[in-house]
Image: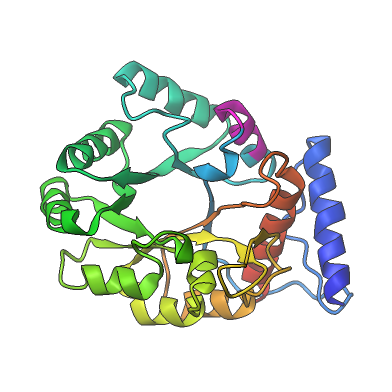
Amino acid sequence: MKYSRRKFFKQGLAGMLLLGAAPVLNAKISNGRMPMQSSVANPFRLGMAGYTFVNFDLDVALKTMEKLDIHYLCIKDFHLPLDSTDEQIKAFHEKCALHKVEGYAVGPIYMKSEAEIDKAFDYAKRVGVKLIVGVPDYVLLPYVDKKVKEYDFHYAIHLHGPDIKTYPDATDVWEHTKDLDSRIGMCLDIGHDLRNGCDPVADLKRYHTRVFDMHIKDVTDASKAGVGIEIGRGKIDFNALVQMMREVNYTGMCSLEYEKDMADPFLGIAESIGYFKAVCDLS
């Protein structure tokens, strides 16, 4: 039963997180029974959006990721400020390495001037990543295009659903970037895309050549009223999403951005990661 699967991940995986043990992230359950071992290869890389840990320091974020066997972090500036020195950046990477975590991108970074774009590209270069998750004002896109060519970076515009007028969904990002350098695309936030009345599975199929990053989450409703919830409990069809990822040969990151109970997110993070990994193994 669906309830049994949810109860399994919540009580089993989350409990292991609290105990500090390595969680059994490959455990799978369907229709209330443990199935045969899946022969489906799981090529997808699961990471964490740094915003998930907005209320926690880097040490807590890294320890949580290590316990959950997650090795990729999209770096937010509250963990590594944009004006960090080279020495601070080096120390950041050394701390990540101790927990077997690698920073794969920076952002989201909001950019409202050419100077802020310059600062973000310089920051990404010094951090040592080649993907920026950004939110530039529309009028600045030609300048972003220029900087992408200069730095040979990928630039993924983060969409925000109905809450912010700029880039509410995948179609809006596509329409504003389709004629720009092919290294400019989107961070497909599947929850916000759904909240703006769109179908994130169809949008992945439609725009996959410009999807460089995904924020994986679930939401309670396909409208502005929808809020974050543990993966598998909301409105997103994750079986269909993973099947589409396979169909389009998606090779970017799948980063959990958990936005429920952000003052105490750990049980929900564990449940969400366990559910998503199981779907990837079975779909």
Image location (x, y in percent) of residue 62: 59, 34
Q: Quadrant of residue 233?
A: bottom right
From the viewer's perspective, tell me whether residue 136 is left or right of residue 69.
left
Judge whether 45 appears above or below 162 on screen.
above
What segment is highlighted magenta in the picture?
56-64
Task: Kindly identify the residue that appears in the image at 62 percent across and 52 percent down.
Answer: 258
Q: Is residue 74 visible?
A: yes
Q: Quadrant of residue 226?
A: bottom right
Question: Tell me, what colour scheme is on the image?
Answer: rainbow
Task: Kindly identify the residue that appears in the image at 82 percent across and 65 percent down.
Answer: 6
Magenta segment main secondary structure: helix
From the viewer's perspective, tell me whether residue 22 is left or right of residue 95.
right
Image location (x, y in percent) of residue 165: 37, 62
Judge whether 119 appears above or below 267 on screen.
above
Judge whether 159 appears above or below 96 on screen.
below
From the viewer's perspective, tell me whether residue 178 is left or right of residue 7.
left
From the viewer's perspective, tell me whether residue 159 is left or right of residue 183.
right
Judge whether 55 appears above or below 13 on screen.
above
Image location (x, y in percent) of residue 136: 27, 52
Pick the front one: 142 or 273 = 142
Q: Assess whether residue 261 is covered by the magenta stretch.
A: no
Image location (x, y in percent) of residue 269: 69, 50
Task: Kindly identify the residue that appears in the image at 85 percent across and 61 percent down.
Answer: 8
